[in-house]
Amino acid sequence: MSWTRKEFIGPVPPPPCFTPKFSETCTKKRASNNGHGTDDALTVTRILEAADIPCCMVGICALIFYGAARVRHDWEICVPPHLLDKVVALLKSDPHSATYHVAEPWDTWSSSLLHTWHRFKHHETNFSFVLVPDRDVHIVCEPPNFTRSLRGLPYPRLDVFIQSCLDSGDELQLCDVIDGTDLLEEWGEKNLELDGTNDVEWANEATRRSDE
């Protein structure tokens, strides 16, 4: 498709994928929904929304929602950066501290942002999630940009998600979501901003944060 790629200039953004420590995921009870953790994730989003913190599922979670064949290890919950400290404090306070605890981030290469994200695990099951600042995935985390699954989980709208892939130069996610949704070229021309190049300023800032 002609709209699946913007002209890419500047640095390559940090890679989003990771290799899990499988020993972590096999020693506890399975998460809800036969290990998928859908209801567990919904519980977390409801905790945040009750505190007036907008959130949505991003990364592999969003790809799966839109039909891509991916394997999820952590649920990736996107929040506004200025509310990140509030989210962490909320989850570490009573009564939520009785359910979740801070976990070590995944081991990643130095160019990834994964080591900068707060990671939480359930005390009794293998459910785990990371808090992703919306700037790291080039999405504005606010309700008008969300859609809901049948169970009520918030996700980026399809046009918002694909636009983020285009602007951040994430061709792997872009190809996966297009394959999963069978989009036509006409849809992209109607719903996406296709002028210009990838967001060089964003890529530079993401690279700087990954080095901190």
Image (cartoon, rainbow, N blue to C red):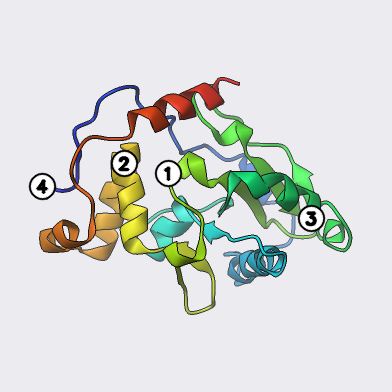
**Identity, as a three-letter code, of the amino acid under mark 4:** Ser
Q: Earlier in the sequence, mark 4 or mark 1?
A: 4
How far across and down, in percent of the image, does residue 185 sit? 12, 58
- Nearest to N terminus: mark 1 or mark 2: 1
Comes first in the chain, label 2 or label 4: 4
Q: Circle 2 sits on which residue?
A: 167
**Alpha-carbon distance for marks 3 and 2?**
32 Å
Disc 3 to disc 1: CB gap under 8 Å: no
Residue depth check, mark 2 versus mark 4: number of the one nearer the observer: 2
Q: In the depicted view, which residue is nearer to us: 189 or 183?
A: 189
Local crowd at mark 4 within 10 Å, few (<14), some, or many (≥20)? few
> Dot 1 surroundings within 10 Å: few (below 14), some, or many (20 or more)?
many
Amino acid type of disc 3?
A: Leu
Q: Which residue is mark 1?
A: 138
Q: Is residue 64 visible?
A: yes
- Where residue 193 appears, as percent x and y from the top left, is 23, 50
Is label 3 in contact with label 2 (beta carbons under 8 Å)? no
Label pair 1/2, CB-CB below 8 angstroms: yes
Amino acid residing under circle 2: Asp
Q: CA distance from mark 1 to mark 2?
A: 7 Å
**Disc 4 marks which residue?**
2
From the viewer's perspective, is residue 179 above or below residue 15?
A: below
Q: Which numbered mark, 4 or 1, is in the foreground of this view?
A: 1
Q: Secondary structure at mark 4?
A: loop
State left or right for residue 194 relative to residue 84.
left
Q: Which residue is mark 3?
A: 90
- For marks 3 and 1, the one nearer the N-term is 3
